[in-house]
Amino acid sequence: MTNNDILKKLRVALALRDDDIVEILQDVDFKISKTELSAFFRKEDHPNYKNCGDQVLRNFLNGLVIHLRGSKEKPKLPGDVLLEKHKRNNLKK
């Protein structure tokens, strides 16, 4: 399983949009554009496909921990974060 596969599966499992992933990466001071991010979700044979490097995945996972648990100074319950996201997604529909 590649880093791209892991990122895709987490995106689907947590119902994350590109904006969410960019924001999660910004929480750990990792800058990436939506265009760069979309290259990770393309099929391998697509001309704009790009391998997701270890650094990108590592920063995403670290940011995801902060996104779901909060920082040490401001802890939060992961269930509350997911419930809030679910409510926001239902309002957008």
Image: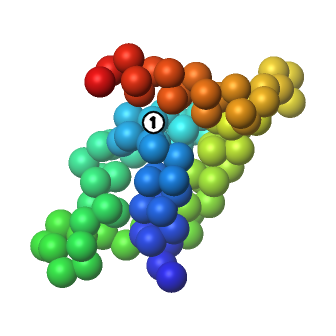
Residue 49 seen in the figure? yes
Tell me the residue that label 1 is attached to. Answer: 20
Question: Vertically, is 28 above or below 93?
Answer: below
Q: Residue 31 placed where, x, y %?
A: 45, 42
Q: Which of 84 and 28 is in front in this view?
A: 84
Q: Decide: few, some or many residues near mark 1? Use Cα within 10 Å; few <14, some 14-19, many ≥20.
A: some
Above or below — where is 84 with respect to 44?
above
The C terminus, quarter of image:
top left
- Compared across the picture, whether 20 is left or right of 33 comes to right
Residue beneath the point at 71% across and 33% down: 79
Residue 42: image location, x then y, percent: 25, 66
Q: What's the residue at 24%, 73% (across, down)? A: 43
Q: In this view, does 12 lie to the left or right of 58?
A: left
Q: In which quarter of the image is residue 4?
A: bottom left
Specify the amino acid type for callout 1. Answer: Asp
Q: Is residue 56 visible?
A: no
In the image, what residue occupies the spot 54% across and 38% down?
Answer: 24
Within the image, what quadrant is residue 88 found in?
Answer: top left
In the depicted structure, whether residue 36 falls above or below residue 76: below
In this view of the protein, which residue sits in the foreground, 31 or 75?
A: 75
Q: State the image coordinates of residue 83 (x, y, percent, origin top left).
A: 61, 28
Q: Which colour scheme is used?
A: rainbow
